[in-house]
Image (cartoon, rainbow, N blue to C red):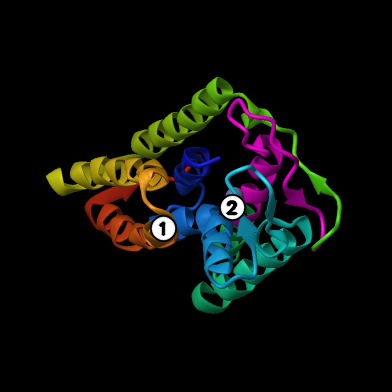
């Protein structure tokens, strides 16, 4: 799953509008970001044939650890229990959605790739994204639903607030293009989620947000 995670982040904004949008976007992308870092450092690997070893980022046990760590760090910074809980749950939502969508064969028969514990532990995954069409519809559908919720529950203060959202969507469109890049360059795409920091700041500075009632 790619854009679906972003859809979940955007949909969560009205639950506690004080939560920075960049934090929401980073939270749902954290596990993939970590996976990229671990692949670069040789701790994990992912091959084009669908085989992989990613227990430190995508394992169920570590998913719970990343969730608890997010709660702790956010609590220390914000002292806001609700914000900490939302961000922690968003981090774990990545594991849940990956469990449903992986393995992402997109028409090819890929092996299950989400570990329960560590290396050599059983791997799980319901395989929703083994079908390319289901993957496309689900990913774009979740992003669309999240975007509608985000836009309906917020207002632009000025023109910049509208453009910030358009730029966020265009920025995300870069992600799949990384698949066309040579392997060495595609490593750079690991760091694309860091772009959510200025984009989220830009959104929050130029929009006002409503809470779910
Ligand atoms: Zn993932």
Q: Quadrant of residue 106?
A: top right
Q: Residue 115: within the magenta?
A: yes
Left or right of residue 22, residue 159 in this image? left
What residue is at 54 percent from the left and 20 percent from the top? 133
Give coordinates of residue 208: x percent, y percent. 29, 49
Dot in front, 2 or 1: 1
Q: Within 8 Å: ligand 1 and the Cβ of disc 2?
A: no
Give coordinates of residue 8: x percent, y percent. 52, 42
Q: Nearer the viewer, residue 70 or 29?
A: 29
What residue is at 16 percent from the left and 48 percent from the top? 160
Q: Nearer the viewer, residue 54 or 12?
A: 54
Q: Nearer the viewer, residue 26 or 110?
A: 110
Element type where label 1 sits in the image: helix
Establish if 11 lies above or below 130: below
Establish if 79 lies above or below 18: below
What residue is at 39 percent from the left and 31 percent from the top? 148
What residue is at 64 percent from the left and 64 percent from the top? 44
Give coordinates of residue 85: x percent, y percent. 62, 60
Left or right of residue 83, residue 67 in this image? right
If you read the primary sequence from the N terminus, does the residue marked by circle 2 or circle 1 appear first? 2
Q: CA distance from mark 2 to mark 1?
A: 15 Å
Is residue 74 in view?
yes
- Give the magenta-colored segment's residue range: 90-118
Q: Residues within 10 Å of mark 1 (few under 14, many from 20)?
A: some
Q: Residue furthest top?
A: 133
Q: Quadrant of the N terminus?
A: top right
Element type where label 2 sits in the image: helix
Q: Residue furthest left?
A: 159
Establish if 164 lies above or below 36: above
Residue beneath label 1, please? 193
Residue beneath label 2, please? 90
């Amino acid at each position: 799953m790619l854009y679906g995670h972003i859809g979940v982040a955007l949909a969560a904004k009205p639950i506690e509008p004080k939560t920075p949008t960049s934090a929401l976007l980073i939270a749902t992308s954290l596990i993939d970001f970590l996976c990229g870092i671990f692949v670069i450092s040789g701790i994990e690997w992912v091959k084009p044939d669908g085989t992989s070893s990613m227990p430190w980022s995508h394992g169920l046990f570590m998913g719970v650890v990343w969730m608890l760590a997010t709660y702790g760090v956010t609590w220390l910074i914000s002292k806001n229990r609700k914000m900490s809980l939302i961000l922690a749950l968003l981090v774990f939502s990545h594991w849940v959605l990956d469990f449903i969508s992986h393995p992402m064969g997109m028409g090819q028969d890929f092996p299950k790739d989400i570990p329960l514990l560590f290396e050599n532990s059983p791997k799980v995954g319901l395989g929703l994204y083994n079908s390319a069409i289901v993957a496309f519809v689900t990913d774009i559908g979740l992003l669309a639903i999240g975007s509608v919720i985000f836009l309906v529950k917020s207002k632009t203060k000025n023109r910049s607030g509208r453009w910030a959202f358009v730029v966020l969507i265009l920025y995300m469109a870069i992600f799949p293009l990384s698949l066309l890049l040579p392997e060495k360059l595609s490593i750079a795409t690991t760091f694309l989620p860091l772009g959510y920091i200025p984009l989220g700041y830009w959104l929050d500075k130029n929009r006002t947000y409503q809470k779910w009632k």
